[in-house]
Amino acid sequence: MKYAYYPGCSLEATAREYDLSVRAVCSSLGVELAELPDWSCCGASSAHSTNRWLAHALAGRNLALAERAGLDIAVACPACYLRLKTTYKEMKDDPQQREELVNLIGMPYEARYNTRHLLDIICNDIGLESVKERLTKPLVGLKLVSYYGCYLVRPPQVVAFDDPENPQSMDMLLDALGAEVRDWSGKVDCCGGSLSLSKREIAMQLVKEISEMAREAGAEAIVTACPLCHSNLEIRQARQNRLPIFYFTELMGLAFDIPEAKSWLKKHLISPLSLLASHNL
Amino acid sequence: MQYLDKSGQAVLDAQFCQKVKEASRTNIGRCYQCLTCSLGCPVAFAVDYLPNQIIRMVQLGLKQQALTSSTIWLCASCESCVTRCPNDVDILRLMDTLKEMALRERVEGREKTIAAFHHTFLKSIKQWGRQHELSMLLQFKLKTRDFFSDIDLGIKMLLKGKLKLLPPRFRGSKETRTIFQRIDRELARGEKT
């Protein structure tokens, strides 16, 4: 199983530990990630918010690169995922727009290759049975809530591998890792990540609601698949009694007993190490 | 909503709704004000007009009010309204279209910090091809003249290796810059909507 891996900008900097854990876990599961050569930024929220064609062109350049490589794209960041997938879908459905895109990016593009999120690939292609086979150190006793946020599941017209209101894939994955997964109503709420730097007070309010809900559900930590949610939940949580935030791949690494897993966690701003120690993990 | 200006003149723009419809490629006319969008909107507590009110403004042609509202900028792009709208109105694309129009027509909005953030973010991509957080954050601080907030956080992130000192270097950065230039050119010629 081989994919063109699109790390995206966050995974090279603020979410370095996500990138490291993704690569380690995929190699352990036999998913070959060939980094998309010469990839560039997808444009993120700022492009689609202010210039529709810029958003398509920035995403489209990467789609065309993957087409040149002849591979489907695997993405870790849900924001990149939605941007790439939106452009892929619009261009596939509308040849006239596709022609305009080709002129803008100066590369051929026929919308032949899909873009997939790694959570989708792991849960639906690899399957939970294979995940369980790799399990050497089950996360027994660790009480978690899975936080999907926005772009993994919304809008269902574009990204449709799980239910948009009550998704289950991450819950089932964490359950397969042996953790105690709590049900809660915050799993698809927005954390305000796109406003984290420009409107701090709004982000803080939304993060407060999410962390309170997680605590009420009895969770000791929140699990995410998004680098933007991860930073926002880390930096905008109130100062006291903060819940650690994990990437789902970090927990897979711990449960697979990958030696460098602990070193990923040292990059967190809210250290989860004492929580793990309390469960002998 | 205000239908008359201070001198008693009507402020409706008859073409506005049609223009927005074409640019956003969504049928705003289908909205029957069920308020599902506003009930699920995470930033409803912070906006001056709720999403359903913005749709109504566009339907009525209240261009100035829609383009100067804080709502279009505070929209967190969470896709909840798009997912839940029973009439398939793509409210997010509508908000994006209104932001794009506000910028193009140089309408002074209420949320200048957010507009400044987008500007700085894109400038950084134009320059480097990939985002370089550190220089982008410094430029954002200069632009908004907010020098002291989050300084402790920035230092912590630097120490954790979460902010790179040097910008990314790769071959494709030139191609990305060309894309920006092509789009600027076409916009200037009025070819892209």
Image: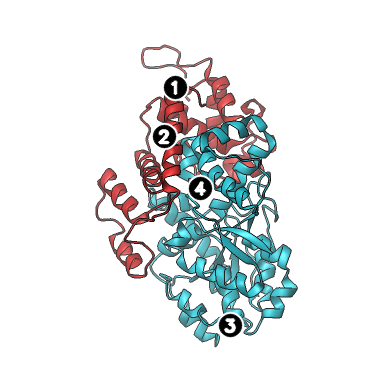
Q: Position of residue A188 (x, y in %)?
A: 60, 56
Q: Position of residue B135 (x, y in %)?
A: 31, 53
- Which disc, if any, is residue B189? 1
In the figure, A210 relative to B78: above or below?
below
Q: Secondary structure at mark 3?
A: loop
Label 2 is found on which chain of the structure?
B
Q: Which residue is mark 4?
A: A42
On the question of residue B40 being in view, the answer is: no
- Give the crowd class for mark 2: few <14, some 14-19, many >=20 residues within 10 Å: some
Mark 4 falls within which chain?
A
Q: SS for tag 1?
A: helix
Figure label count = 4
Q: Which chain is red?
A: B
State the mark number for residue A257: 3
Give the residue at mark 2: B181
For label 2, the SS is helix
Does the residue at mark 4 contact the one at mark 1 (Cβ under 8 Å)?
no
Of the two numbered discs 1 and 3 in the rendering, the one whose residue sits closer to the viewer: 1
Q: Chain for mark 3? A: A
Type of the residue with mark 4 = Cys
Discs 3 and 4 lie in a common subunit? yes
Within 10 Å of the Cα at label 1, are there few (<14), some (14-19), or many (20+) other Cα atoms?
few
Q: Quadrant of the N terminus of chain A?
A: bottom right
Residue A88 in view, yes or no: yes
Return the residue nearer the eye: A102 or A233.
A102
Q: For the residues carrying marks 2 and 3, which lies nearer the camera in this image? A: 2
**Closer to us: A195 or A108:** A108
Distance from disc 2 to disc 1, alpha carbons, whole Å, reads 12 Å
Chain in cyan in the render? A
Q: Are marks 2 and 3 on the same chain?
A: no
